[in-house]
Image: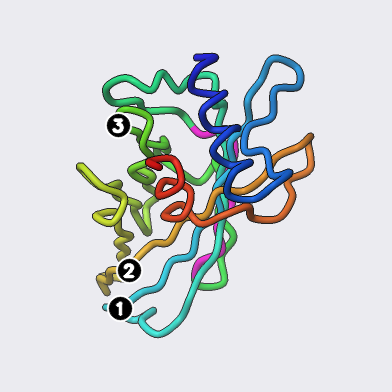
Amino acid sequence: MANINHKFSSTSASLNPGCAIINDSNQRNTIKYDFEVSPHRGPAAGNNYYGSFSFNGSKLTGRGIDFIKLDNFDFSFLSVDYSNADLLFAEAVFINGNFLGLIASSEEFSFVSGFLDLSEAYFAYDINSNFGAADVTFSLRQVTDDNFETVCTSEASFFMGALT
């Protein structure tokens, strides 16, 4: 696990000097993502909805598929604020250390991760039998303590830098 943390920290520093992605304080690595849901089908089409989630990065092995339970989830959708307590399940999904998205579901919506690539991730919803679908954009956020700071880099930019 130490090698994965080092890789993430080094990569983020090369993309944005002084921006650490993983917080090593208290032996806990908190990783936080912000996301934007942009419905293109259904009654919510044309609007954007925002949220965030975080999890313990020390659970990330970087080998094979990792499903990591979320510590926090906040999402405002159709004038309703959702938290972890409103979800039936919620996990961040990685394959070989690459983020594939979020799998999470409530009675009204579901996040579906990509199978092989983050670009395959999407959001689906059902409000009073009105079905819809949306694109999801994820951004990795800097964490320095119990307060979450501004977004460091988009997920796509982060992984482009990680590959070079």
| Viewer-nearest residue: 139 or 164 | 164
Q: What residue did someone put label 1 on?
A: 40
Q: What residue did someone put label 3 on?
A: 95
| Quarter occupied by the C terminus | top left
Q: From what the image shows, is residue 43 above or below residue 80? A: below
- Splitting the image into 4 quarters, where does residue 50 fall? bottom right
The nearer-to-camera label among 2 and 3 is: 3
Say which element carries label 1.
Answer: strand
Q: Amino acid at mark 2?
A: Ala
The nearer-to-camera label among 1 and 3 is: 3
Q: From what the image shows, is residue 130 above or below residue 93? A: below
C-beta proximity under 8 Å, tags 2 and 1: yes
Q: Is residue 14 magenta?
A: no
C-beta proximity under 8 Å, tags 1 and 3: no
**Residue 76 shows in this picture:** yes
Report the label total: 3
In-image side of 117 versus 81 (left or right): left
Range of residues picked out in magenta: 70-77
Q: What residue did someone put label 2 on?
A: 134
N-terminal of the pair, mark 1 or mark 3, is 1
Q: Amino acid at mark 1?
A: His
Image coordinates of residue 129 in percent, x first then y, are: 25, 70
**Residue at 58% over, 42% down:** 12
- Mark 2 packing: few (<14 Cα in 10 Å), some, or many (20+)? many
Image coordinates of residue 144 in percent, x first then y, are: 76, 37
Q: Amino acid at mark 3?
A: Ile
| Viewer-nearest residue: 144 or 163 | 163
**Residue at 21% over, 42% down:** 116
| Viewer-nearest residue: 52 or 20 | 20
In-image side of 65 versus 32 (left or right): left
Q: Residue furthest left?
A: 115
**Residue 83 shows in this picture:** no
